[in-house]
Amino acid sequence: MKTNPIITLANSGFKIANKVWSIPNTYTLTIQSNASGTASSDATIGTENYSTNLYATPDEGYRLNSWNVTGGSVSNNVFTFGNTDAIVEPVFEEQSIPLDMDFIYQAKDFDGTKIPNKALNSTFGDYLQQGTLTVNGEGSLCYLSNNHSDNNYLYKTLTNDELNNIKAIDTAYTWFIRVSATSGVGGIMSTRANGGYIYMIRSRNNLLEIHTSSGNSINGFSLTQEYVYKVVIKGSSFYAKNLVTGDEYSFTYSTNRSMGTDMRTFNAGYGGESNLDAFYAMAGIARETTAAEDEIIKNVLLEQSA
């Protein structure tokens, strides 16, 4: 005859202390999308104080601005459960890229021969490859490198009108730059290779440099961190701003604007001056820009989202 193991254990003289197992309350997380994009999370169920990553995928022309949350809390795209069910919805904002941009070049768009121009209504053209460039990373962290070789660079042959705009003798030209460098000299925007070099924008020993007839390295304007720099040239006025930290720098200098017709990145024109480590993105427009436009263009370059 089979015996009941529980009864057998009880009859054997062993005693089991009563235990109460407390199961924590669990709560649900509902992710809502909207007409401008979608969202998701690593987890949709959790206990109080449990955290999970949130992800937002904006439609083209939009970017994540914030999160609407009911129950729990959100910080740095991480949701933390409270003691109730929760709802989270991404808030997207429209990126109104100025329609008169000359160019927007992003490393993630490199197709093996060029970076297509993503400016909306521009005839400025693409950024072409000379030699060999290497694609590293992907998405917003994608960058191009040139093995510090003078033979490997990006270039654009400027028309007379484009060159005159960039010279900015009587009007302004504004550059937006996201690159990195740790040593030596490298070209960010150089027209020195075929006849002239006043002015150009370079990297020198991990700093941003605005070159007139001589270099003006900007202390504190490091190229080793995730920054976007704005540089405005207008007549004899030169101005730079770190669009992430807000730091500013300016000086005045009268130059003869001796500049060639090839605009290059990586190669700064002289042998051994191709030490830019990484090209992420660059944009240009033939006028001064507003603070609101700066914010939009900064985000486009940081996210490579044009």
Image: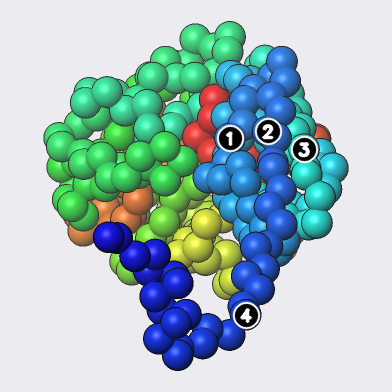
The label number, if any, that marks residue 303 in the structure image: none
Q: Earlier in the sequence, mark 4 or mark 1?
A: 4
Are the two marked residues, 2 and 1, in contact with CB atoms closer than 8 angstroms? Answer: yes
Image quadrant holding the C terminus, namely top right
User: Measured from the top left, where is residue 115 in percent x and y?
Assistant: 35, 25
* Sequence-first tag of 3 and 2: 2
In the rendered structure, find residue 18 and report the number of the disc placed on it. 4
| Mark-to-mark CA distance, 3 and 2 | 6 Å
C-alpha distance separating marks 2 and 1? 6 Å
Residue 48 visible = yes
Asked which quadrant contains residue 168, the reply is top right
Residue density around tag 2, few if under 14, some if 14–19, many if 20 or more, within 10 Å? some
Badge 3 is on which residue? 87
The residue at the point 22 percent across, 47 percent down is 146
Going by the numbered disc 3, the residue's amino acid type is Ile
- Which residue is situated farthest in the right direction here? 70
User: Residue 301 or 60: which is nearer the viewer?
Assistant: 60
